[in-house]
Image (spheres, helix red, strand yellow):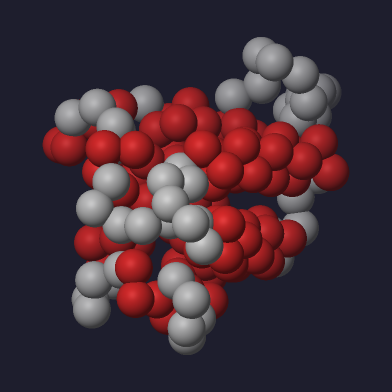
Amino acid sequence: MTEPMAVDGPDVNVFEAVGGRPFFDRMVARFYTGVADDPVIRPLYPDDLTESIAHTAGFLAQYWGGGTVHYSDERGHPRLRMRHGHVVIGQAERDRWIHHMTVAVHAENLAPALEQRLLAYFEMGATAMINGPG
């Protein structure tokens, strides 16, 4: 009998625990559905969100254990602060980003330990991206 996959602990590969790239594609598509109609953060994105969706899903798939094939093999080191430096991100933008990402994560009905791990990362990452007033 196969043991269920652990979903908690530092050695858990989140990419595998959530079912791989399809999870990140779904979650990020849901996130951008919220972004598309948000008057605070929609202006920060290009008119066509197609590349933003692909890049975000790929970055997250790589970050959570899916390997560099999802992002860095094509785009190089993520350099998140540098890639977003042309956009002023204040507290208001950070909060709206977190809102939409939290909705997207909750919609996946993950095990609580996985959900908590993802949301903690997004909280930390979004706060680190603040580079201006807002």
Query: In this view of the protein, which residue sits in the foreground, 4 or 123?
Result: 123
User: In this rendering, would 100 be left or right of 78?
Assistant: right
Across and down, in percent, residue 89 comes to 43, 56
Query: In this view of the protein, which residue sits in the foreground, 86 or 70?
Result: 86
User: In this rendering, would 9 be left or right of 60?
Assistant: right
Across and down, in percent, residue 127 comes to 57, 43
Asked whether residue 69 appears in the rendered view, the answer is no
Snapshot quadrant of residue 46: bottom left
Above/below status of 124 relative to 22: above
Across and down, in percent, residue 132 comes to 43, 51
- Rendered residue at 57%/57% (across/down): 91
Numbered disc total: 0
Asked whether residue 134 appears in the rendered view, the answer is yes
Snapshot quadrant of residue 113: top right
- Rendered residue at 37%/51% (across/down): 56
Furthest toward the top, the residue is 11
Above/below status of 53 relative to 43: above
Q: Quadrant of the N terminus?
A: top right
Snapshot quadrant of residue 48: bottom left
Furthest toward the front, the residue is 133
- Rendered residue at 78%/26% (across/down): 8
- Rendered residue at 74%/45% (across/down): 115
Across and down, in percent, residue 100 comes to 59, 67
Query: In this view of the protein, which residue sits in the foreground, 79 or 110?
Result: 79
